[in-house]
């Protein structure tokens, strides 16, 4: 894989991580009523919104290193009618804008009104369009390895897994900053926190099975995916197995860490550490998957 493709690895993974955290943590928190509680005049949701915007900012900055002429970046918006690249950039900018509006409303103490909920829904809408544009950008006839259903599947899977696990990790960091060890204590009510944990574990399991179905040589329970869901080029079996082991390991660690909370009790000791370990394992698996995505396209990743 050429060094110029590494900024795209960072951009796609960070963009999907930010989108997932927003959809799995921030959006439910806005409508749950939980984030409006303040401690020492601070609103915990502002910290998570700042984190999501920072991740998007780093992703955007990374994409500049892929451009041959970074100063010409504004020209990328000039072809919205036909270019998925232009649409991708537009939706990312709109996503950041609505996040900033939402953060401003919470900062001004207007987070419970209809305007904040409208901004939250609009942010969710452009976030989904941002993800769709990102996937469609790579589905070009000139690169057969990408022009198939496996591409949007892999991008959506990364968003779901990284977003749910990243949401738990972010909730834990903010909660500890406010003096509470329970992940998501101030951002989501206790039932919401358990739901998010169950969803995260379920998504990891679905992703493991889904990726197993994507291999041309292997199936699950004798069932194989349709050709369009199979990547045109596949890595060695050991490489692929390592990805699945890391991803499955993240799910196992998450369930072990949150087992007391899933039974209705308080989170166990050190739950935040285990959540971060689970997130790290899943992120490493997705990083290997993205390396495969660009490396096995044989240099076809240039925009």
Image: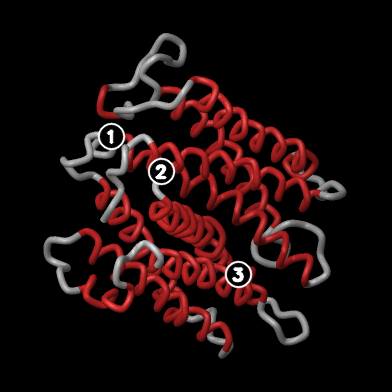
Relative placement, left or right, of 90 versus 285 is: left
Q: Which mark is residue 1?
A: 2
Q: Which mark is residue 145?
A: 1
Mark whose residue sits in front, 2 or 1: 2
Q: CA distance from mark 2 to mark 1?
A: 14 Å
Residue 68 rendering spot, x and y as whole percentages = 30, 66
Q: Mark 3: which secondary structure?
A: helix
Which residue is at the front of the view, 71 or 77? 71
Between disc 2 and disc 3, whose residue precedes? 2
Task: Say the numbered circle drawn on residue 48.
Answer: 3
Q: Earlier in the sequence, mark 3 or mark 1?
A: 3
| Quarter of the figure with the N terminus | top left
Mark 2: few/some/many CA within 10 Å (<14, 14-19, 20+): some
Q: Position of residue 179 (x, y in %)?
A: 83, 69
Q: Nearer the viewer, mark 2 or mark 3?
A: 2
SS for dot 1: loop
Location of residue 106 with respect to 182 vertically, above or below: below
Task: Locate residue 138 relative to residue 128 in the image: left or right.
Answer: left
Would residue 91 appear left or right of 114 to someone viewing this image? left
């Amino acid at each position: 894989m050429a060094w110029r493709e590494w900024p795209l690895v960072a951009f796609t993974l960070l963009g999907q991580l930010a989108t997932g955290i927003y959809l799995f943590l921030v959006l439910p928190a806005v409508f749950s009523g939980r984030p409006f509680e303040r401690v020492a005049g601070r609103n915990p949701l502002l910290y998570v919104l700042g984190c999501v915007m920072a991740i998007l900012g780093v992703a955007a900055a990374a994409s500049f290193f892929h451009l041959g002429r970074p100063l010409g970046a504004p020209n990328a918006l000039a072809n919205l009618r036909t270019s998925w690249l232009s649409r991708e950039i537009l939706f990312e900018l709109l996503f950041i804008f609505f996040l900033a509006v939402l953060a401003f409303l919470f900062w001004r103490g207007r987070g419970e009104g209809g305007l904040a909920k409208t901004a939250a829904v609009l942010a969710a809408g452009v976030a989904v369009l941002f993800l769709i544009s990102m996937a469609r950008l790579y589905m070009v006839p000139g690169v057969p390895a990408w022009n198939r259903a496996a591409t949007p599947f892999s991008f959506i899977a990364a968003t779901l897994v990284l977003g749910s696990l990243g949401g738990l990790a972010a909730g834990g960091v903010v909660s500890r900053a406010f003096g509470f060890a329970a992940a998501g204590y101030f951002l989501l009510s206790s039932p919401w926190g358990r739901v998010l944990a169950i969803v995260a574990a379920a998504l990891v399991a679905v992703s493991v099975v889904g990726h197993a179905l994507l291999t041309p040589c292997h199936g699950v329970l004798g069932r194989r995916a349709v050709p369009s869901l199979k990547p045109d080029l596949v890595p060695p079996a050991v490489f692929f197995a390592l990805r699945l082991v890391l991803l499955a390991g993240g799910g196992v660690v998450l369930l072990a860490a949150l087992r007391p909370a899933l039974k209705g009790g308080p989170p166990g000791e050190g739950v935040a550490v285990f959540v971060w370990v689970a997130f790290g394992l899943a992120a490493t698996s997705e990083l290997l998957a993205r390396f495969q995505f660009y490396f096995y396209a044989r240099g076809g990743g240039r925009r």
